[in-house]
Image: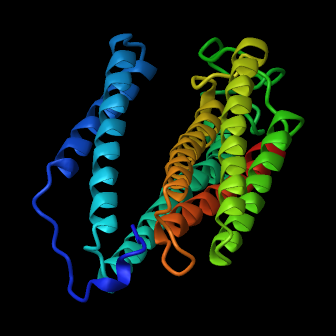
Amino acid sequence: MSSTHTSATPYYFVPAESRHPAMAAAGLFFVILGAGQWVNGHTWGMYSLAVGMVWWLTVLFQWFRDSIRESEGGLYGYKIDLSYRWSMAWFIFSEVMFFGAFFTALWWARAHSVPALGSLDNALLWPDFKAVWPSLAAGVTAAPAGHIEPFQTVGPFWLPTINTALLLSSGVTLTIAHHALRENHRGRTISFMWATVVLGFVFLVVQGYEYYHLYAELNLKLTSGVYGSTFYMLTGFHGFHVFIGMLMLFFTTLRLQKGHFTAERHFGFEGAAWYWHFVDVVWLGLYVLVYWL
């Protein structure tokens, strides 16, 4: 990422061959394998997920460490800075498509699948089915009975609203930190960056408590029909992105304390900020479409 030495290099730096992409892909393989097996009732999937996650995070740490050393060594010029900006922009675009797919799945289930199952064509198969959302919630019956345990839906009050306030506040503190950095007020920047990291951490704690409440008291699980699956896929993946964003901000703050960024050259900071603001926007969509509608 950009450093104090960026403008000193006139050529395009070509890094040496790296093992990091292959190693990161291997770690993600065990993450996906373990998650898929765990949700399907195989206990060993939990251990595969844990090992894959530790593996992947270790590779990312080594990869970013090498990149920081190259940057601080004066190897990065304008072209590298530009490539980082385009890479981050395309990465965030891919994330937009990722969440767009799940939002579309939620819309399709509510607007098309559930009404279709309640049509006259399916009345012979499921004569007692009520074409309302969410289907199979407590008080809503469907045939064949017994496939899904009754559950209660979740509204916006109060934990989701608290989390909305936390994320919006973190966006404000991050913006203040960015402006402080551009004005070369390093102490103010670091203080508001730590505030942003803490707000992100508290968000994850509140979401973890919310999941416990849903499982223990509302009986809402990943297996609770299409409502449960879309709810946990959207909120769970978003929570994972908050975790990744919080790590970005955490290490960015540590780099700030070491003096790695200047008022003019700090894309390492900006890239993390772009990602965090994207996470904020996705949560607002979740808050309205999942908790309110």
The structure residue drawn at horizontal position 60% and vertical position 58%, both measured from the top left corner, is 276
Q: Is residue 61 left or right of residue 171?
A: left
Q: At 41% from the left edge and 19% from the top edge, which residue is drawn? A: 38
> Which residue sits furthest right?
157
Viewer-side residue, 257 vs 215: 257
Residue that appears at 66% across and 21% down = 143
User: Does residue 233 lie above or below 41 as drawn?
Assistant: below
Q: Is residue 178 above or below residue 159?
A: below
User: How far across and down, in percent of the image, does residue 145 sit?
Assistant: 65, 14
The structure residue drawn at horizontal position 64% and vertical position 62%, both measured from the top left corner, is: 277
Identify the image quadrant of the N terminus.
bottom left
Residue lying furthest left: 17
Residue toward you, 32 or 180: 180
Q: Is residue 35 left or right of residue 142?
A: left
Count of labels in the image? 0
The answer to whether 11 is drawn above or below residue 185 in the figure is below
Specify the quadrant of the image occupied by residue 159: top right
The residue closer to the viewer here, 186 or 276, is: 186
Residue 191: % across, % down = 71, 53
- Can the viewer see residue 129? no
Which quadrant of the view contains residue 39? top left
Residue 155 location (% of width, % of height): 84, 36
User: 142 and 124: which one is in front?
Assistant: 142
**Colour treatment of the image:** rainbow
72 displayed left or right of 16? right
Residue 61 in picture, x, y percent from top left: 34, 44
Where on the picture, by quarter, is residue 36? Answer: top left
